[in-house]
Amino acid sequence: GRTIKLEIEDRPDVGGELEWIIYTPENWVWNNDKLLTTEEISDVLKRIDLAFWTLDRKIKEII
């Protein structure tokens, strides 16, 4: 399989609900091997967004 490591932080919003901050890598690579194209990065971010939406989690920002 392919792996990309991201850092994720959760913080409560003003209402106490958790919102998530996702820190993306400076260099997007699969398993420290192949650089991702802009299209692949966009696809990964869309999948992350969909996964959080499916789990009813709120993303505050992606950095």
Image: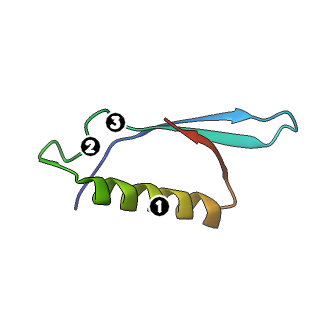
Residue 4 x/y as whole percent: 30, 47
Look at the numbered disc 2 and give the secondary structure of its residue. loop
The three-letter amino acid code for the residue at tag 2 is Trp
Question: To which residue does mark 2 refer?
Answer: 28
Residue 14, numbered circle: none
Look at the numbered disc 3 and give the secondary structure of its residue. loop
Residue 17 appears in which quarter of the rendering?
Answer: top right
Query: Which residue is at a point 34% across and 36% down the rendered structure image?
Result: 25
The three-letter amino acid code for the residue at tag 3 is Pro
Q: Are marks 3 and 2 in contact (CB under 8 Å)?
A: yes
Q: Is residue 10 above or below residue 59?
A: above
Look at the numbered disc 1 and give the secondary structure of its residue. helix
Q: Is residue 42 left or right of residue 16?
A: left
The three-letter amino acid code for the residue at tag 1 is Lys
Q: Is residue 27 above or below residue 29?
A: above
Residue count near mark 1 (Cα–Cα under 10 Å), binned few <14, some 14–19, many ≥20? few
Q: Is residue 5 left or right of residue 23?
A: left
Query: Which residue is at a point 79% across and 35% down the rendered structure image?
Result: 13
Nearer-N-terminus badge (2/1):
2
Question: To which residue does mark 1 refer?
Answer: 46
Residue 57 x/y as whole percent: 67, 54
Residue 45 x/y as whole percent: 44, 55
Residue 19 appears in which quarter of the rendering?
Answer: top right
Q: Tell me how far mark 2 sits from mark 1, CA to CA.
A: 15 Å
Q: Are marks 1 and 3 in contact (CB under 8 Å)?
A: no
Q: Is residue 14 above or below residue 30?
A: above
Question: To which residue does mark 3 refer?
Answer: 25
Q: Tell me how far mark 3 sits from mark 2, CA to CA.
A: 6 Å
Query: Which residue is at a point 84% across and 37% down the rendered structure image?
Result: 16
Residue 3 x/y as whole percent: 27, 52
Residue count near mark 2 (Cα–Cα under 10 Å), binned few <14, some 14–19, many ≥20? some
